[in-house]
Image (spheres, helix red, strand yellow):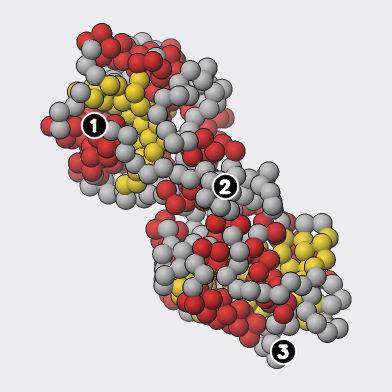
Amino acid sequence: MTVFILVAGAFTGPYVWRDTAAYLAAGGADVRTVALTGLGKGAGGPAESVDLETHIADVLAVIDRAVAEGGGDIVLVGHGYGIHPVLGAADRRAGAVARIVHLDSGMPRDGVPALAAVPDQRLREELAEGGGWRTAGELPPPARDGWSRWGSTAGVSEAALDGLTALAAPQPLGTLLQPLRLTGAAAGVPVTGVLCTGNGPGIELVQLMVDLGEPALQALADPRVTFFELPTGHWPMLSCPAELAGVLTEAAAGGGHRLKAPGTAGPPPHLRPFLLDVPERPRERTGNTDLYLPDGPGPHPAVVFVHGGPVPAGARPTPRDWPTLTGYARYVAGRGAVSAVLDHRLHAVTDYGRAAEDVADAVERVRADPRVDGDRVALWFFSGGGPLTADWLAAPPPWLRCLALNYPVLAPLPSWGVPDARFRPVRAVAHAGSLPIVLVRAGREMPEIAATVEEFLTEAARCGADVEVVDVPAGRHGFETLDRTAESREAVHRAVTAVLKRLERGGPTTR
């Protein structure tokens, strides 16, 4: 028999597991829900006396009771904040735990408090500053319309949201501020991640981040780590309890998707060859920018290519040497325009400000080059570089003849919290005026990214923006190195032709 020990997230208690626990029990499992002190079983003393260690002790007590009763293999399930006391307890009872399940939760590290995992960046700042909460020793639960600051409520019924709000309890502040202490004793315990794609990345995006070399994520490619997806928001025990119970049962049996470690199946997707056989061209490297020059004296129009991300700071090669960027650059230079490819400092979702500075600086250097016609420039953005288009959409300069986007992220993903409101292309497109936009849409896009593209196109249609969509129906995110098909090659030809057409002499220079 499997013993599931379920630990709820912030502000909540055992009641959130009611339906999921019933489904698990009906399948023959022993299900135990942990009542965390101050949340599920009364305060048990002043709020300031309750911290993360208190909650770790709560989980340990349930583990020890299950071991004493000889129930079976123990599977610890931590939802959101709940993964912190789960990991703390597993570290001290590693020999007793068969599996740890991260249910729509992060990857806490030794010495880092749960505060770091709060999804809303502004709320993190408010909590760090303390304010009146420092005196009270606890954080009041969200109002009914405030739960989204802690995770997407997609799929949660109105009645369930009412119940969640009515039963919520204040969160003792010490549970968020006290650092988690781990010795590494539980490193060998198998792990499962259940990703709720209505609230954060799915398996495909996690694999992409692993492929990019993000150091903190390399452990996810261990064969002892499995993944499942649920197409719902942050509270699957409320939105799809039967499906969650099924996933937990499969996880306990060792099922799930396993990620590929970089290099085990050839080059990672972003380092595979470009889909077109484009002749090599000389390039000039200055600082963080490479120039690919066309034949003839010029001045020529220019296309500046802006990579996506976030990309780990230590990733090698850097994006300007990735085949997609160099392939486009050589192809465009061969068709008569200067190509510029730059590295920028988008290493985390909090880095869009400095990445935007890098892009703006590079654009001005390119425009100032005597071989470039500074009044005929296009900017071409990829993937997670999409939010950087917001500045250019909000106030297009007269020399910007076209803005292109390939499989872009065009609104903050739910897991990003609330980044700078400046980087929201969905809002900025209303100010684009007559700026031509070429958008390359992958038909097999990751759902969480596809949703932002559709939101952008809906807003663009509403405000009458000039958008040409180049569809790649069978294409995936990063199709230029993943899908070497006639359809994909034709899409590249169409997109490049559309951009270069906007750079022809005599085109509009004012908006």
Residue 511 placed where, x, y %? 63, 81
Residue 282 is left or right of residue 435, and the answer is: right
Name the foreground residue: 40 vs 224: 224
Q: Residue at x 41, y 42 (%)?
A: 258
Tell which of 37 and 215 is nearer to you.
215
Query: What whole-number distance in Å separates the C-alpha atoms at marks 2 and 3?
Result: 46 Å
Crowding at dot 1, Cα within 10 Å, few <14 / some 14-19 / many 20+, comes out as many
Residue visible at 36% across and 31% down in the picture:
101
User: Which amino acid is tagged 3?
Assistant: Arg
Query: In the image, is 325 to the left or to the right of 120?
Result: right
Q: Quadrant of residue 306?
A: bottom right
**What residue is disc 1 on?**
17
The spot of residue 219 in percent (x, y) is: 51, 35
Q: Secondary structure at mark 3?
A: loop
Q: Residues within 10 Å of mark 3 (few under 14, many from 20)?
A: few
Q: Amino acid at mark 1?
A: Trp
Q: SS for tag 1?
A: helix
The image quarter in which residue 384 lies? bottom right
**What residue would you read off at disc 2?**
263
Query: Residue 37: where, in percent of width, then height?
Result: 34, 17
Question: Hey, what amino acid is under mark 2?
Answer: Gly
| Mark 2 or mark 1: whose residue is earlier in sequence | 1
Q: Is residue 37 above or below residue 354?
A: above
Q: Where does label 3 land, which residue?
A: 505
